[in-house]
Amino acid sequence: MKNVILVLILSLSFGLSQAFAQGSISGQVADSKTDETLIGATVQIDELGLGTATDADGRFHFPDVAAGTYTLSITFVGYRDHEMEITLAEGEDLDLNIEVEPDFLGLDEVVVVAYGEMDRRDLTGSVASVSGADVETVPVSNIESMLSGRTSGVQVTQSAGLPGGEVTVRIRGNASIGAGNQPLYVVDGIPIYTGDTAGSLAGNADEHTTSALADLNPSDIESIEVLKDASATAIYGSRAANGVVLITTKQGRHQDTEVSVSHYTAWSQPNEVYDVLDAPQYIQIRQEAGTWDPTDDPAAHTTHEWVDAVTRTGMTQNFDMSLRGGDETTRFYIGGTFFDQQSYLITNEFERASGRINVDHDASDWLSIGANLQMTRGTNVRVGSDNLVQGLLTSAALQSPNHPIFLEDGSYNLAAAPGNIAQNVVFVARENDRQLQTLRTIGSIKAEIRPSDNLLISSNWGLDYLSTDDYTRYMAGHGDGGADGAGFNQKRSVYNWISTTTANYRTTIDEVHRLTLLGGMEFQQLRRDHLSVAATDFPSNLFPNVASAANPTLTSSSLEELWGIESYFSRATYNYDERYILEGSARVDGSSRFGDENRFGFFPAGSVAWRLTEEEFMQNVGHFDELRLRLSYGITGNDNIGDFASRPLWESGANYGGQPGLAPDQLESPELRWESAAQVDMGIDMAMFGERVSLSVDLYRQDISDMILNVQLPASSGFTSVTENVGEMYNQGLEIDLSTHNIAGSFNWFTDFNISFNRNEVTQLVDDDPILGIANQRAAVGQPLGSFYLPEWHGVNPDNGEPLWIGEDGNPTSNYGEAEWDYRGSAMPTSYGGLTNTFTYQGWEFSTLLQFVYGNSIYWSSGTFLWDTRTAFNKSTDVLDRWQQPGDVTDMPAAMTQANPNQPSTRFLKDGSYLRVRDVTLSYDLPTDLLTQFGLRHLQIYVQGTNLMTFTEYPGLDPEVGNQGTATLGQGTDFFTPPQMRTIQVGFNMSF
Amino acid sequence: MKTLKFFSILVAISLTVFTACDVLDVDPEQEIPTELVFDDANGAETAVTGMYEAVSFGNSYGGFPLIAADFRGGNSHFVGSFVTWQDAAAFNVSITNGTVQGVWNANYTAINRANNIIASAPNVPDVSQDQIDEWVGNGHFVRAISHFNLVRWFGQPYGYTADNSHPGVPLVLEPTEGPGEQNNIPRSSVAEVYNQIISDLETALANVPDSYGASVLDRGRATTGSVSAFLSRVYLHMGEWQLAADYASDVLNSDMYQLQGSYEFFDNENTAEDIFAIQMTTESNPGTNAAFSAMHRPSPVGRGDINPSVDLWNAYENEDLRKTQLYSVGADGTDLPEEVTQQSELNNVWTLRYTSGNYDDNVHVIRVAEMMLTRAEALAELNGINQESVDLLNQIRNRAGLDSYATADFASGQELMDAILHERRLELAHEGHYYFDRTRRGLGLDGIANLGGDSIDFGVNEIVLPIPNREMELNPELEQNPGY
């Protein structure tokens, strides 16, 4: 019956449309300043839900349009939205010439801010935006990596070149020593969990960590906003000191359903691999060192290429499909993606399948409801890295090169090379099994109530649930598997819920006073649990599960994280005549983490902007299209001080003889509270010459106090530290963003350049004693964070080949104990930035992104092994330059065992500056008139190269490293960290 | 309509507020505050267990300090890749050596746990005085053996100066409450440290039971037997021969301890051979590189980092069961080399004293054979050639399948003494003694395998470990050992 009605309706409408003569609307879209026609601009007739894009001549055409009055809207990136009302008479063929105004600054762009949106022109704080469209083709697993080099004040470092790994993001430098420096990530209003989720059987902290942000799918992203100064962030209160990253996903919109399909395939290689000795060289060096039979003939040994055996050309594939559309009352976005990245290390692979549904519906003229839901399944087939004896690149480089990988019968050579603990990493990779599986759900339900035109009350209930299953199985017969195999299984769950209610009131008085008021409250709690088991002695390698093993070695379940936060906040924005903008905000945060005596914290901010170009006296001054001054000040906090750090505690787990034990674990600290950051920011934004040049400059200073520090205790106390609010430091810096439209016309050349300078200095520590970090990094008063404290290497004594350091008397000494220790550089760069050049011609676009980091040092810990001639490990070919006879002038000591040249010194401290060709893309948009014949709206094909070249003097594999994940005092450490991938990629984006 | 709007707003806000209940009211679940620990007997008991966990650490009695006494004494060859261990084996230790820092930390962690027991156990409500005494006695025992571990590694031996005024280690006798200058404790002299150790052991002896009625506790905690055994060992280090002999006989006269007829006690846990043994389980050592079997056994059980030295190997007679039964070639070969001339001939020879693939071998800290040899040595010092010393020595030799001596076989007291010390070396090899058995007698160290067989003279600076640099920087009261 229903079908009959449907058919009837369809026939009726068909009949109706035949009954009236149809007209058409066509036209040409051009730049109002240059008169250049614009290709690819979106043209829509809102009332009819019709949309198209301009062709190679800038023309569009809507055939068969009924008579009536319509709103025609034209949108195009870099231009102000243009709307016009047109009336089409019956049978008329309208031909329009439409001019749109360039909006190089994006002043009319709507920018997502904390708890709302704002026109860019109303901003008083420092907010950087990156559009999802700009970065969604970057072939990386993590969203953070896409920000690299694209905006000032944001430094992005991938900890290792393996997929799914942690990424270090620093907004305006480091704001903490002990409480973490990762920004707060907020996805559609939900502050999400971002920590490491992996584990390992041996609890190796050095291994490359994983990131919970890898669960987000880049192609779902509409925009990423980075809130940098205190006026933008203070409304996030006690969690905002490291800056805030707002991630907004794509929402549905009122249009014909648009189906988008995209795909890319990428091939990757390691940026560089270790150049190690061949077998004869290795034997010879060991003979010289006296650790190998001197009568053995080096030439008789065959070289086995261990590094080649564990590397390959990796392949990445991404398939993405989405539907986006809606009508006047209901809008939707549905997206699904499959991403598969095989890295350059054998067996290492990361897979992600994700789906998202975003729906919103206007239930009435005063009530809207909406829901966002994302589910992601991730599988990371991990390999050991960094400081692990089963690390593929680590052991491949260090394995004795005369040690065969396989025996003559083709089976693995499972014996250890004499004196060498390196495992057979080909066995490790191929036979052992290590998988991290994650299931992530991020969802929210929202209700918006409009009691009046001015007032909007919005409630949002969100859930972020993550469960991980980390599985390791070491097979019998080798290395960690021991005689009968070992297994490990760890499950984690993160349960993070939040509820937020805000009221937003807007009014305009006498046409010149615009006022916006926001008030809200928010409650959040996060709980992370973990359960792990390990066992040894399996009946055979066919049994994957720990339950099959004979001897349990670990059974553990624990609460890893639990905290709650209760918040009240408000913000007022006042705009006078588009000239003066004032904003004030405040938040009160109560946190379970703070000590009893400091449960609630108060975080205020204020800011002002003055748009000089709106003033009478500026109307004929210079060539300014926009000139704006900004000033802001505010206080933010960092609550990442440990969940129960304020309490005196005894910990369970101190078991002995199979009986449960308790041991003192933490000393009391009742006044413990958040770290505090007071930041002042002065900015100027300008646009000139018909918006051909735009420049933003920000100067800031951030004074951090009450830093949570582990006050070091003499270990004779039984503790090594206690936590207190004691430290102070500051960051001050300068950020410049310069964009120019160098050539305009049918051929366009755009340049975007950003550079950030940040200076950090630690000004107060406990008793001004330095804090010792990893690999000789320190926080020390008067020094930037992460300064390396080391003796100075003075090379090799030409007389005897022994190492020399500079002694306390200023003279070279061969006695390491007499060497003078001092500060020799910092892991923090003095400047960093990026340069993007984009060239467009008709449908062609070519763009390059150069990214650089300057002025940081890296402690190349790998060198302490690769240059060590005392051990059985293989060595870098650098040792061929060793001292051999008196008079040899070299920096490489003789091969010997009596002296140890590898003790910490500037011998291994290297300049980490680099300039990298991070991204080169050539794309072509097929002409619209061609596409329409196939029913397509849009088709782009592209080829892209990532990390194609790196210019650096760093001797390690890659200067973009983070051996210690995101650990603050371990940033500039490289211990066999896998290098970044160098990638070539081809792909297409299509919609219909 | 207006009512509906108002109602909706009310629902939205109250839902939000409803979720807020007790959002800040959370507690840790694996940890409890100090006052709850000593709130009842169960809490105090688990705290005592937790104290022994620290004694079992790989840098306390559970690993390095014992293993290193053999490769630094001349009994074994460290061939592993750990640089901090290599440097220790080659007497080339830096002030930043992480393992040395670990030894310092582990033993002082045990001492702080012990001090907490000593201070808080007496306040546990509703328990008998005997129970409190037992806890406090265990606290004193752990404090004593941990200070003893420290003073033997960080100070020159007892007797290095005539009045033993040379620096020992900081004596920490109160639980740590918080940061402050009270934690900056200077090094006491070796005499003061030994006096405190004796005093703590005597307090322990007066308070601990003969037996707990469970073998894990009898061999793994302080008993009158294990405290007496430590007193005997400490007095032996001090050259207080009569006291060493007396306390040894106290142990040997106890029914709980009995020289075993074979070496199977190395495979069986908590036999009557053990007086004090670290109670390891399969969960004690995963990933702990210092575990004894991990170090001493080759793949697939362990890392294969330690071989016997040439000197030790040649010291065994070929028919000595401690050679034929307690060593293998490779994983299980029995074709042992006879006398050797080069260390490389022993590259595939491994001791079988610790064999567990799960690293759960108990560590035999003090066993009956040591007490017999201690008494034999002390009596020989006091009386020269004497029948009891020879009898004790013969019991050890007979078990190893070797012939007995008669008193007439020794021309002098010194000859008897040499025979006892030789036997002690062979009997207790790979168990953490030889380095101290040399230095406590003022002897240098010979045949150090990691120095290519070279010797180290008694009294040189390298004999002792440096005070860790971190401690020197944090505690201005500390004085570094000369030469570092």
Image: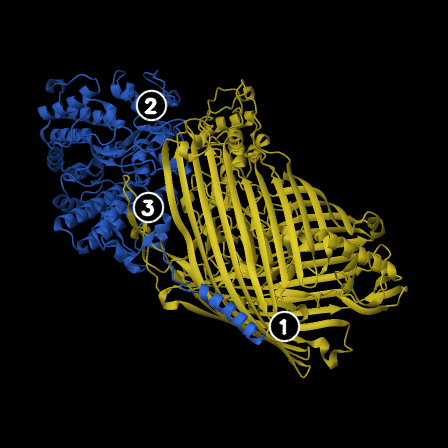
Give the chain letter at badge 2. B
Q: Percent from the top left, x then y, of residue A922?
A: 76, 47
Task: Quote the CA–CA distance across marks 1 and 2.
Answer: 79 Å
Mark 3 Cα-neighbour bin, 10 Å: few <14, some 14–19, many ≥20: some
From this view, report whether residue A470 is shown above or below residue A300: below
**Relative to residue B458, is residue A373 drawn left or right?**
right
**Relative to residue A141, is residue B156 drawn left or right?**
left
Residue highlighted by disc 3: A653
Q: Percent from the top left, x then y, of residue B9?
A: 53, 71
Tag 3: residue type? Gly
Q: Are marks 1 and 3 on the same chain?
A: yes
From this view, report whether residue A607 is shown above or below residue A161: below
Instruction: Tell which of A920 and B346 is nearer to you.
Output: A920
Residue highlighted by disc 1: A630
**Relative to residue A617, is residue B204 drawn left or right?**
left
Work out whether mark 1 precedes mark 3 in sequence or the reverse, and give the earlier one: 1
Task: Quote the CA–CA distance across marks 1 and 3.
Answer: 55 Å
Q: Are marks 1 and 2 on the same chain?
A: no
Q: Secondary structure at mark 3?
A: loop
Using the rendered view, name the quadrant where residue A307 is placed: top right
Tag 2: residue type? Val
Instruction: Tell which of A485 and A295 is nearer to you.
Output: A485
Q: Percent from the top left, x then y, of residue A479?
A: 45, 30
Colour of chain A, in one word, is yellow
Q: Secondary structure at mark 2?
A: helix
Colour of chain B, in one word, is blue
Task: Quote the CA–CA distance across marks 2 and 3.
Answer: 42 Å
Give the chain letter at badge 3. A
Instruction: Tell which of B346 and B381 is nearer to you.
Output: B346
